[in-house]
Amino acid sequence: MNDDLQNLELSEDEKKLYEELLPDDINELSDFGAQRRHFLKLMTAAGGGILALQMLGAQEIFGHPVSESAMSELQAASIENSVKVAFRVNGSGKSLTIDSRMTLLDSLRERLQLTGTKKGCDHGQCGACTVMVDGRRVLSCLTLAATCEGKSVTTIEGLSKDGELHPMQAAFVKHDGFQCGFCTPGQICSAVALLREAKNGEASYVTSDIRSKPRSLKLSDDEIRERMSGNICRCGAYPNIVAAIREVHSGKEVAQKWQFVSENTKQIVRIDEKIKTIQ
Protein backbone atom coordinates (compact mmCIF):
# COMPACT_ATOMS: atom_id res chain seq x y z
CA MET A 1 0.00 0.00 0.00
CA ASN A 2 1.61 3.31 -1.06
CA ASP A 3 1.83 6.52 1.02
CA ASP A 4 -0.80 8.36 -1.04
CA LEU A 5 -3.38 5.66 -0.29
CA GLN A 6 -2.43 5.53 3.38
CA ASN A 7 -2.77 9.31 3.76
CA LEU A 8 -6.32 9.47 2.36
CA GLU A 9 -9.02 10.83 4.65
CA LEU A 10 -11.25 8.30 6.38
CA SER A 11 -14.51 7.19 4.85
CA GLU A 12 -17.77 7.52 6.76
CA ASP A 13 -17.75 3.82 7.67
CA GLU A 14 -14.22 4.11 9.00
CA LYS A 15 -15.19 7.16 11.06
CA LYS A 16 -18.09 5.21 12.59
CA LEU A 17 -15.74 2.35 13.51
CA TYR A 18 -13.29 4.86 14.97
CA GLU A 19 -16.09 6.33 17.08
CA GLU A 20 -17.06 2.89 18.41
CA LEU A 21 -13.47 2.02 19.36
CA LEU A 22 -12.38 5.41 20.73
CA PRO A 23 -15.47 7.47 21.60
CA ASP A 24 -13.43 9.88 23.76
CA ASP A 25 -11.27 10.87 20.79
CA ILE A 26 -14.08 11.51 18.34
CA ASN A 27 -13.96 15.27 19.02
CA GLU A 28 -10.30 15.35 18.09
CA LEU A 29 -11.16 13.48 14.91
CA SER A 30 -13.84 16.05 14.09
CA ASP A 31 -11.52 19.02 14.70
CA PHE A 32 -8.37 17.78 13.02
CA GLY A 33 -9.46 14.85 10.86
CA ALA A 34 -7.52 11.60 10.65
CA GLN A 35 -5.37 10.00 7.99
CA ARG A 36 -5.82 6.42 6.91
CA ARG A 37 -2.28 5.66 8.15
CA HIS A 38 -3.44 6.49 11.69
CA PHE A 39 -6.57 4.42 11.22
CA LEU A 40 -4.64 1.36 10.01
CA LYS A 41 -2.30 1.57 12.99
CA LEU A 42 -5.29 1.71 15.29
CA MET A 43 -6.86 -1.38 13.69
CA THR A 44 -3.58 -3.27 13.98
CA ALA A 45 -3.28 -2.39 17.66
CA ALA A 46 -6.89 -3.38 18.36
CA GLY A 47 -6.45 -6.74 16.61
CA GLY A 48 -3.26 -7.41 18.52
CA GLY A 49 -4.99 -6.61 21.79
CA ILE A 50 -7.79 -9.10 21.14
CA LEU A 51 -5.24 -11.78 20.22
CA ALA A 52 -3.26 -11.09 23.38
CA LEU A 53 -6.37 -11.44 25.53
CA GLN A 54 -7.21 -14.78 23.96
CA MET A 55 -3.66 -16.08 24.40
CA LEU A 56 -3.23 -14.90 27.98
CA GLY A 57 -6.24 -16.84 29.24
CA ALA A 58 -6.64 -16.36 32.97
CA GLN A 59 -3.29 -14.60 33.43
CA GLU A 60 -2.97 -11.06 34.71
CA ILE A 61 -3.59 -8.21 32.30
CA PHE A 62 -2.20 -4.79 33.22
CA GLY A 63 -1.56 -6.07 36.74
CA HIS A 64 -5.13 -7.20 37.38
CA PRO A 65 -6.13 -10.89 37.46
CA VAL A 66 -8.79 -11.84 34.94
CA SER A 67 -11.49 -14.18 36.22
CA GLU A 68 -12.45 -17.26 34.24
CA SER A 69 -16.02 -15.99 33.82
CA ALA A 70 -14.81 -12.62 32.56
CA MET A 71 -12.47 -14.34 30.11
CA SER A 72 -15.33 -16.51 28.86
CA GLU A 73 -17.50 -13.43 28.33
CA LEU A 74 -14.66 -11.74 26.46
CA GLN A 75 -14.17 -14.75 24.20
CA ALA A 76 -17.93 -15.10 23.66
CA ALA A 77 -18.18 -11.43 22.68
CA SER A 78 -15.56 -11.96 19.98
CA ILE A 79 -17.45 -14.93 18.45
CA GLU A 80 -19.60 -14.18 15.45
CA ASN A 81 -23.13 -15.66 15.47
CA SER A 82 -22.55 -16.98 19.00
CA VAL A 83 -24.96 -19.44 20.63
CA LYS A 84 -24.88 -21.19 23.97
CA VAL A 85 -24.99 -24.97 23.93
CA ALA A 86 -25.46 -27.16 27.01
CA PHE A 87 -24.98 -30.91 26.63
CA ARG A 88 -23.34 -33.89 28.28
CA VAL A 89 -20.01 -35.22 27.04
CA ASN A 90 -18.85 -38.58 28.39
CA GLY A 91 -21.19 -38.19 31.35
CA SER A 92 -20.13 -34.65 32.32
CA GLY A 93 -22.25 -31.57 31.77
CA LYS A 94 -20.70 -29.01 29.41
CA SER A 95 -21.80 -25.51 28.47
CA LEU A 96 -20.13 -23.71 25.57
CA THR A 97 -20.57 -20.42 23.79
CA ILE A 98 -19.70 -21.16 20.18
CA ASP A 99 -20.27 -19.97 16.65
CA SER A 100 -23.59 -21.39 15.47
CA ARG A 101 -21.76 -22.87 12.48
CA MET A 102 -19.15 -24.74 14.55
CA THR A 103 -19.15 -28.51 14.09
CA LEU A 104 -19.32 -31.00 16.90
CA LEU A 105 -15.88 -32.27 15.85
CA ASP A 106 -14.24 -28.85 16.24
CA SER A 107 -16.07 -28.24 19.52
CA LEU A 108 -14.75 -31.50 20.94
CA ARG A 109 -11.19 -31.01 19.75
CA GLU A 110 -10.70 -27.25 20.01
CA ARG A 111 -12.94 -26.28 22.92
CA LEU A 112 -13.02 -29.40 25.09
CA GLN A 113 -9.54 -30.77 24.20
CA LEU A 114 -10.98 -34.23 23.48
CA THR A 115 -8.54 -34.96 20.67
CA GLY A 116 -9.21 -38.70 20.50
CA THR A 117 -11.84 -37.97 17.86
CA LYS A 118 -9.89 -37.46 14.65
CA LYS A 119 -10.40 -35.06 11.77
CA GLY A 120 -9.74 -37.06 8.62
CA CYS A 121 -11.42 -35.97 5.40
CA ASP A 122 -13.69 -33.38 7.10
CA HIS A 123 -16.30 -34.27 4.44
CA GLY A 124 -18.09 -37.20 6.08
CA GLN A 125 -16.43 -39.79 3.87
CA CYS A 126 -13.85 -41.57 6.07
CA GLY A 127 -15.58 -42.12 9.42
CA ALA A 128 -12.55 -41.17 11.55
CA CYS A 129 -14.65 -38.55 13.39
CA THR A 130 -17.46 -40.95 14.39
CA VAL A 131 -18.90 -40.39 17.88
CA MET A 132 -22.20 -41.35 19.50
CA VAL A 133 -25.01 -38.90 20.20
CA ASP A 134 -27.70 -40.36 22.43
CA GLY A 135 -26.29 -43.80 21.64
CA ARG A 136 -26.40 -43.44 17.85
CA ARG A 137 -23.30 -42.98 15.74
CA VAL A 138 -22.89 -39.71 13.89
CA LEU A 139 -20.19 -38.09 11.79
CA SER A 140 -19.12 -35.24 14.03
CA CYS A 141 -17.56 -33.31 11.14
CA LEU A 142 -21.04 -33.00 9.57
CA THR A 143 -22.92 -32.41 12.84
CA LEU A 144 -23.40 -28.88 14.13
CA ALA A 145 -22.62 -28.65 17.82
CA ALA A 146 -25.70 -26.45 18.28
CA THR A 147 -27.93 -29.41 17.33
CA CYS A 148 -26.62 -31.35 20.34
CA GLU A 149 -28.35 -29.10 22.86
CA GLY A 150 -29.57 -31.25 25.77
CA LYS A 151 -28.14 -34.45 24.26
CA SER A 152 -25.50 -36.91 25.43
CA VAL A 153 -22.28 -37.26 23.43
CA THR A 154 -19.90 -40.19 23.88
CA THR A 155 -16.39 -40.10 22.42
CA ILE A 156 -13.58 -42.65 22.47
CA GLU A 157 -12.38 -41.13 25.77
CA GLY A 158 -15.70 -41.98 27.43
CA LEU A 159 -15.85 -45.70 26.65
CA SER A 160 -13.50 -47.00 29.34
CA LYS A 161 -14.77 -47.11 32.91
CA ASP A 162 -12.68 -46.91 36.08
CA GLY A 163 -9.50 -47.58 34.15
CA GLU A 164 -10.91 -50.68 32.45
CA LEU A 165 -11.08 -50.83 28.67
CA HIS A 166 -14.46 -51.21 27.00
CA PRO A 167 -14.83 -54.79 25.66
CA MET A 168 -14.63 -53.44 22.11
CA GLN A 169 -11.40 -51.60 22.87
CA ALA A 170 -9.92 -54.74 24.42
CA ALA A 171 -10.98 -56.81 21.40
CA PHE A 172 -9.34 -54.35 18.99
CA VAL A 173 -6.10 -54.66 20.95
CA LYS A 174 -6.34 -58.47 21.09
CA HIS A 175 -7.01 -58.88 17.36
CA ASP A 176 -4.63 -56.12 16.27
CA GLY A 177 -7.51 -54.19 14.74
CA PHE A 178 -5.38 -51.14 14.09
CA GLN A 179 -2.00 -50.24 12.67
CA CYS A 180 -1.38 -46.50 12.44
CA GLY A 181 -4.36 -45.98 14.77
CA PHE A 182 -5.70 -42.80 13.16
CA CYS A 183 -9.06 -44.31 12.19
CA THR A 184 -9.33 -46.45 15.34
CA PRO A 185 -11.38 -44.06 17.55
CA GLY A 186 -14.03 -43.77 14.85
CA GLN A 187 -13.90 -47.51 14.13
CA ILE A 188 -14.46 -48.41 17.79
CA CYS A 189 -17.25 -45.86 18.37
CA SER A 190 -18.96 -47.09 15.21
CA ALA A 191 -18.59 -50.73 16.30
CA VAL A 192 -20.07 -50.04 19.76
CA ALA A 193 -23.07 -48.30 18.19
CA LEU A 194 -23.37 -51.13 15.65
CA LEU A 195 -23.93 -53.65 18.45
CA ARG A 196 -26.74 -51.52 19.83
CA GLU A 197 -28.35 -51.35 16.38
CA ALA A 198 -28.18 -55.14 16.07
CA LYS A 199 -29.64 -55.56 19.55
CA ASN A 200 -32.58 -53.36 18.54
CA GLY A 201 -33.14 -55.45 15.41
CA GLU A 202 -32.27 -52.69 12.94
CA ALA A 203 -31.76 -54.11 9.44
CA SER A 204 -28.93 -53.27 7.04
CA TYR A 205 -28.63 -53.47 3.27
CA VAL A 206 -27.57 -57.14 3.40
CA THR A 207 -30.08 -58.35 6.00
CA SER A 208 -31.78 -61.38 4.43
CA ASP A 209 -35.27 -60.93 5.85
CA ILE A 210 -36.20 -57.35 6.63
CA ARG A 211 -39.88 -58.16 7.18
CA SER A 212 -39.21 -60.10 10.34
CA LYS A 213 -37.93 -57.79 13.01
CA PRO A 214 -36.19 -59.86 15.66
CA ARG A 215 -35.30 -58.05 18.85
CA SER A 216 -31.68 -59.06 18.45
CA LEU A 217 -29.95 -59.76 15.14
CA LYS A 218 -27.16 -62.31 14.86
CA LEU A 219 -24.60 -60.62 12.68
CA SER A 220 -22.65 -62.50 10.03
CA ASP A 221 -19.29 -61.27 8.79
CA ASP A 222 -21.04 -59.79 5.75
CA GLU A 223 -23.42 -57.91 8.04
CA ILE A 224 -20.52 -56.53 10.06
CA ARG A 225 -18.64 -55.45 6.93
CA GLU A 226 -21.73 -53.73 5.53
CA ARG A 227 -22.50 -51.92 8.76
CA MET A 228 -18.87 -50.80 9.12
CA SER A 229 -18.46 -49.80 5.47
CA GLY A 230 -18.53 -46.08 6.34
CA ASN A 231 -15.33 -46.39 8.36
CA ILE A 232 -12.26 -46.45 6.15
CA CYS A 233 -8.93 -47.97 7.24
CA ARG A 234 -6.07 -46.98 4.96
CA CYS A 235 -3.84 -49.60 6.60
CA GLY A 236 -6.26 -52.37 5.58
CA ALA A 237 -6.85 -53.97 8.98
CA TYR A 238 -10.40 -54.98 8.01
CA PRO A 239 -10.22 -58.76 8.76
CA ASN A 240 -8.94 -58.02 12.25
CA ILE A 241 -11.62 -55.38 12.82
CA VAL A 242 -14.35 -57.84 11.77
CA ALA A 243 -12.90 -60.50 14.08
CA ALA A 244 -12.87 -58.09 17.03
CA ILE A 245 -16.49 -57.04 16.47
CA ARG A 246 -17.63 -60.64 15.97
CA GLU A 247 -16.01 -61.69 19.25
CA VAL A 248 -17.73 -58.96 21.26
CA HIS A 249 -21.05 -59.52 19.46
CA SER A 250 -21.08 -63.30 19.96
CA GLY A 251 -19.44 -63.34 23.37
CA LYS A 252 -17.27 -66.21 22.15
CA GLU A 253 -13.54 -66.18 21.56
CA VAL A 254 -12.65 -65.81 17.89
CA ALA A 255 -9.39 -67.17 16.53
CA GLN A 256 -7.65 -65.08 13.93
CA LYS A 257 -7.79 -66.70 10.48
CA TRP A 258 -4.87 -66.05 8.21
CA GLN A 259 -5.66 -65.82 4.52
CA PHE A 260 -3.23 -67.50 2.16
CA VAL A 261 -2.92 -67.26 -1.60
CA SER A 262 -5.26 -69.46 -3.64
CA GLU A 263 -4.19 -72.36 -5.87
CA ASN A 264 -4.79 -70.19 -8.94
CA THR A 265 -2.42 -67.55 -7.58
CA LYS A 266 0.19 -70.23 -6.89
CA GLN A 267 -0.08 -71.48 -10.47
CA ILE A 268 0.44 -67.96 -11.84
CA VAL A 269 3.54 -67.60 -9.65
CA ARG A 270 4.90 -70.92 -10.94
CA ILE A 271 4.36 -69.85 -14.58
CA ASP A 272 6.14 -66.54 -13.92
CA GLU A 273 9.06 -68.43 -12.38
CA LYS A 274 9.30 -70.73 -15.43
CA ILE A 275 9.30 -67.75 -17.80
CA LYS A 276 12.09 -66.12 -15.83
CA THR A 277 14.05 -69.42 -15.92
CA ILE A 278 13.68 -69.68 -19.71
CA GLN A 279 14.79 -66.08 -20.17
Image (spheres, rainbow, N blue to C red):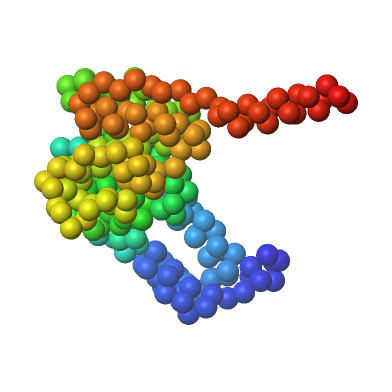
Residue 275 in sight here: yes
Note whether 207 is above or below 279 in the view shown.
Answer: below
- Find residue 219 and report its horizontal and vertical position in percent: 25, 39
Note whether 165 is above or below 219 in the view shown.
Answer: above
Tally of numbered discs: 0
Residue 129 in sight here: no
Image quarter where the N terminus lies is bottom right
Q: Residue at x 78, y 24 (%)?
A: 274
Please indicate whether residue 134 sits to the left or right of residue 31 in the image. Answer: left
Q: Which of 33 and 89 is in front in this view?
A: 89
Q: Nearer the viewer, residue 51 or 157?
A: 157
Note whether 179 is above or below 29 in the view shown.
Answer: above
Please indicate whether residue 267 sits to the left or right of residue 237 in the image. Answer: right
Q: Which of 212 and 3 is in front in this view?
A: 212
Name the residue at the bottom extreme.
12
Q: Residue at x 70, y 25 (%)?
A: 270
